[in-house]
Image (cartoon, rainbow, N blue to C red):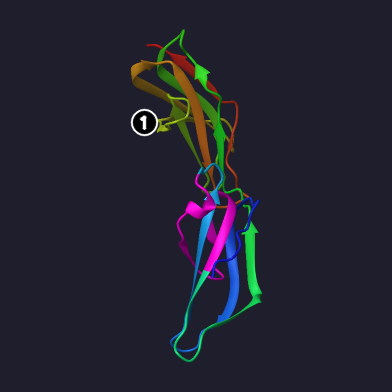
Amino acid sequence: MEFEPFKNLKLDEFVLMSTYLTPDNTGCTWEYRIKLDGDGTALSGQPWLPLSSFTLTDAQGTASEVQLRATFVANEYISPLMSLHDLQFGAFTTALRGDYVSLTVPMDESPFNTITLNYPVNLPGASTVVPQYSLDDGNTWVNFTATPTSSSVSTEWTNIQYIEKLSTTQKSFKLHFKLETPNPYQRPRVDQVTVALTNE
C-alpha cells in the first residue's frame, strides 16, 4: 500500500508511529522514499528505503517530500490488521547541518595559485566546521589539504588559518563552509572570514 506523499515539507528528521497486529505467519514492512532540497529527481524516481516504526530517522539533508509504503504479508487464513487512526508521521527540523556558500569571485585579471583563509570559529560540544573551495563555480568542492594553524582569540573563539598551495594558477574562486552539530543547542559559528588569493 502506497500512501499519498507528504509535500511542502521542510524537515531533516522524521518518525513513523504506527501500531498494527501481525498474527503468526503474517507481517508488515514499512519503507519510505524522500526528495531532498536541490535534488532534481522527482519523488517518484527516488529509491525506496527501509523504515522502522517509532524510530527517529535522519533524512541526510533537508527534505521537501516524503512518501510511505507498507507491504503486508498474509497467510491463507488471516492477514495483518492496521488502523489508519493509529498511523502518525512526525516531521522535525533540528538544523543540525548548515552551509555557507560565497559568491563566485572572478580572478581573470589576477590569476592565483595560493589561497590564504582566515576565520574565527566557535565550536561548542562536538560541533564541526569544514571549509571547502571550488575553482569551477561550485561544480566541484575541494577540501583544504594544507595543515591549518590555530590561535586562541578568547575562551570561546579560535582563529583558524589555511595556506593552500595550488599546482596551477586559477581564475575563479568560491568558498563553502559545512557546519554540523549533534546537538541543536550547541551550534558552531564562524565570524569575519577573510580570503587572500595571491600568485606566489
Q: Name the residue located 51 percent from the left edge and 25 percent from the top edge.
A: 118
Magenta segment boundaries in residue numbering: 41-69
Residue 77 image position (x, y, % from top left): 48, 92
Q: Secondary structure at mark 1?
A: loop
Q: Mark 1 = which residue?
A: 145
Determine if the magenta segment contains residue 58: yes
Q: Name the residue located 36 percent from the left edge and 21 percent from the top edge.
A: 165
Q: Residue furthest bottom?
A: 77
Q: Residue furthest top?
A: 109
> Eyeballing the image, is 165 above or below 14?
above
Residue 136 image position (x, y, % from top left): 43, 25
Q: Is residue 165 left or right of residue 46?
A: left
Q: Name the residue located 64 percent from the left edge and 63 percent from the top edge.
A: 90
The disc labelled 1 sits on which kind of residue?
Thr
Q: Name the residue located 47 percent from the left edge and 30 percent from the top edge.
A: 150
Which quadrant: the N terminus? bottom right
**Residue 61 visible, this angle:** no
Residue 96 image position (x, y, % from top left): 57, 49
**Residue 48 visible, this angle:** yes
Residue 189 image position (x, y, % from top left): 59, 37
> Eyeballing the image, is 39 above or below 72?
above
> Eyeballing the image, is 200 above or below 189?
above
Q: Residue furthest left?
A: 167
> Eyeballing the image, is 18 above or below 186?
below
Determine if the magenta segment contains residue 55: yes
Q: Residue furthest right?
A: 85
Q: Nearer the viewer, residue 3 or 60?
A: 3
Residue neighbourhood size for the residue with mark 1, other residues' Cα within 10 Å, grouped as few (<14), some (14–19), many (≥20) = few
